[in-house]
Amino acid sequence: MPHEEIQLVVEAIEADYNQAVVALHGVSFTVRRGEIRALLGSNGAGKSTTLKAVANLLPAERGRVTAGAIRFEGHNVRATSTGDLVRLGLVQVLEGRHVFRSLTVEDNLVTGAIGRGSGRADIARDLDRVYGWFPRLAEKRRAPAGLTSGGEQQMLAIGRALMARPRLIVLDEPSMGLAPLVVRDIFRTLKQLNTQEQLSILVAEQNSTVALTYADTATVLENGVVVLEGTAAELRNREDIKAFYLGEGAPHAV
Ligand SMILES: Nc1ncnc2c1ncn2[C@@H]1O[C@H](COP(=O)(O)OP(=O)(O)OP(=O)(O)O)[C@@H](O)[C@H]1O
């Protein structure tokens, strides 16, 4: 595989919080251009910490990367602010969605374009594009975001990220708290964005079944260490994985 196709390199990173709790002990993986990589693992495995490290968001939580390297398209992530990473095309959608509840859906989307320096016409075109991907957001464009459903808020968080014109989006648990059909719709749209716009995706999920359905590759974390890595197809066929690593019970449990 040619080197230039590797978009994100995470190399042997270690991270801690409050200079005390060590959350990652040498995590490594890559994301190729146009790839969907799932980051799997049970509660506390280190998924969120890894994603925050990739977006250089750990300092905001008294966390830090203490060793290793992270490079996005050749840029040293540890030395680049989150805002600059967004401008470079690496955009994160955080766990819990974090929409501005009192702003309308459309105003929330427009905030995603801040910092890009775009004019009104560009923003209007990108809004149309997001509404094309998520028609439910178009229907709710004038509604306060806080009054929309959980699924719509997740779509809004993704739509807001798309307004920044990302080349790689980083998503933390997009399925959390959502009904299975809504989760399926969201993952289908992500897959279409991936195939039609060559958008690379790094997604942390506890729902390994849905993640392995849509991802190309997966990395499984346990206690801050990579315990398994492979193509999603390989991992889908390993019945033992859910029982051993993902806290989803024995393989034959109902
Ligand atoms: N802000 C924080 N301050 C201190 N310790 C933290 C903080 N956030 C996470 N940790 C610790 O770091 C470790 C990894 O947690 P992390 O949230 O990355 O796991 P996770 O795989 O994303 O789990 P979850 O699915 O529950 O979010 C855990 O031991 C957790 O307690």
Image (cartoon, grey):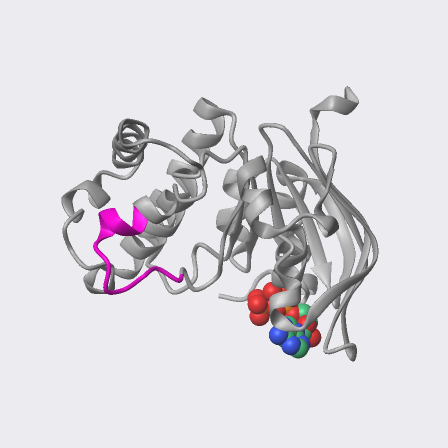
Looking at the picture, does residue 157 appear above or below residue 246? Answer: above
| Residue at x 63% of width, y 51% of height | 81
The x and y percentages for residue 115 are: 45, 43
The x and y percentages for residue 69 are: 81, 48
Looking at the picture, does residue 141 appear above or below residue 15? Answer: above
The x and y percentages for residue 107 are: 25, 50
Closest to the observer: 251 or 248? 248
Looking at the picture, does residue 146 appear above or below residue 37? Answer: below
Closest to the observer: 87 or 22? 87
As drawn, is 29 to the left or to the right of 59? right
Give the mark count.
0
| Residue at x 57% of width, y 62% of height | 252
Q: Is 202 within the magenta?
A: no
Closest to the observer: 207 or 186? 186
As drawn, is 254 to the left or to the right of 68? left
In which quadrant of the rendered image does the N terminus lie?
Answer: top right
The x and y percentages for residue 108 are: 30, 52
Q: Residue furthest top?
A: 2
Q: Is 102 within the magenta?
A: yes
As drawn, is 180 to the left or to the right of 5? left
* Residue 242 in sight here: no
Q: Quarter of the image holding residue 27?
A: bottom right
| Residue at x 62% of width, y 40% of height | 232
Q: Quarter of the image holding residue 22?
A: bottom right
**Image quadrant, ligand 1:** bottom right
* Residue 207 in sight here: yes
Magenta range: 98-109
| Residue at x 69% of width, y 48% of height | 219
